Image (cartoon, grey):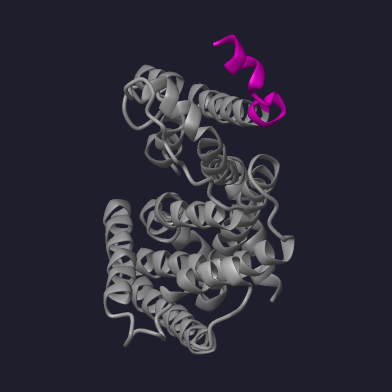
Amino acid sequence: MNELLNGIPWGAIVPILVLHLILMITALVSCIREEKTNGPKWLWILIILFINLIGPVLYFVIGRRND
Amino acid sequence: MTQWTVLYRKEMMEMVRNYKFLWIPIIFILLGVMQPVSSYYMPEILDTFGGLPEGTILEMPTPTGAEVLMKVLSIYGMLGVLILVLSAMGVVSAERQSGVAGMVMIKPVPYSSYILSKWAGLLTITLISLFIGYVASWYYTSLLIETVAFERIFQSGVIYSIWLVFVVTLTLFFSTIMKGNGSVAFVTIFVVFAISTVTSILGKYMKWSPATMTEHTGQVLLSGELNSSFLLAFITTIAILIVILISSIQIFKQKELLE
């Protein structure tokens, strides 16, 4: 396991993690600032937090009310 | 022209405000980067999670850089198209339902400016996302697997973008003729899927089809040369695009009068 960890080119992996984080945080901020979402807000927060990558996308596509 | 610019700027503002300019490029980057990373780690992943019996020797041919990038493009062809269609589905229909379109059209704005500004906005986000994502994927492929000439990336990206532009224009068209967001997305995805399936089954007779752009992209990536039928497909695609745009403008005029 240790070998595996050492062999990881962190320079390549870190940007991916950062992008995931940015996506999640923007979705969260947008969700919290929104007055009303399609469906309960706490559910969206859970979806954004716990479903990786697909959660924020789902929120942006169907969770936001565009008006 | 100035009205068009104003509408286009409004379109851009809106996309910044609802975070589309952030999340769509990020998704394209992540989708593009996943493939080189996972093919780089495939042996380790199989080792750790494969549950293969001790001593199994797997001869895994390491994919070439061009092959990895082709896979990236086929992922864009499925998930990328899905994301683009879902994000663009309400472009006209939602505005009409919420009354924004009516408010815009009260002013003496030509119908063509309205539709064309929407179209330009969609093109901007599509092309930016595709290029950022594709370049990121190229960078990771070069880093982890093998360098691919940037020229080829550029050429294949340009050819591939024609297909995505076609998809986005179709979304705009269905968004003007139909009401619900969901049905727009469903019909668009169904049509896109049908076009590419028919093209791949009847390849011989469908050399003009816009869906052949994906094949031409692969060709350019692998060999750097364009098939002779590219010009035919390119011309028909442009012609179809023009027809779709003109008919959406016409239909939009009719609809506006009815409601």
Residue B1: percent from the left, percent from the top? 69, 76
Query: Is the stretch drawn in magenta largely helix, strand or loop?
Result: helix
Residue B36, visible in the rendered structure? yes
Which residue extends farthest top? A2
Left/right placement of residue B223 relative to residue B201 reads right
Report the front residue among B135 and B165.
Answer: B135
Residue B163: percent from the left, percent from the top? 49, 69
Report the front residue among A4 and B202.
Answer: A4
- A15, above or below A3, in the image: below
Residue B215: percent from the left, percent from the top? 46, 71
Residue B101: percent from the left, percent from the top? 46, 61
Which quadrant of the view contains residue B36?
top right
Residue B107, visible in the rendered structure? no
Left/right placement of residue A65 relative to residue B190 reads right
Report the front residue among B141 and B117.
Answer: B141
Q: Is residue B168 magenta?
A: no
- B248, above or below A42, in the image: below
Q: Is residue A10 magenta?
A: yes
The structure residue drawn at horizontal position 58% and vertical position 80%, both measured from the top left corner, is B226
Left/right placement of residue B144 relative to residue B70 reads right
Segment colored magenta? A1-14
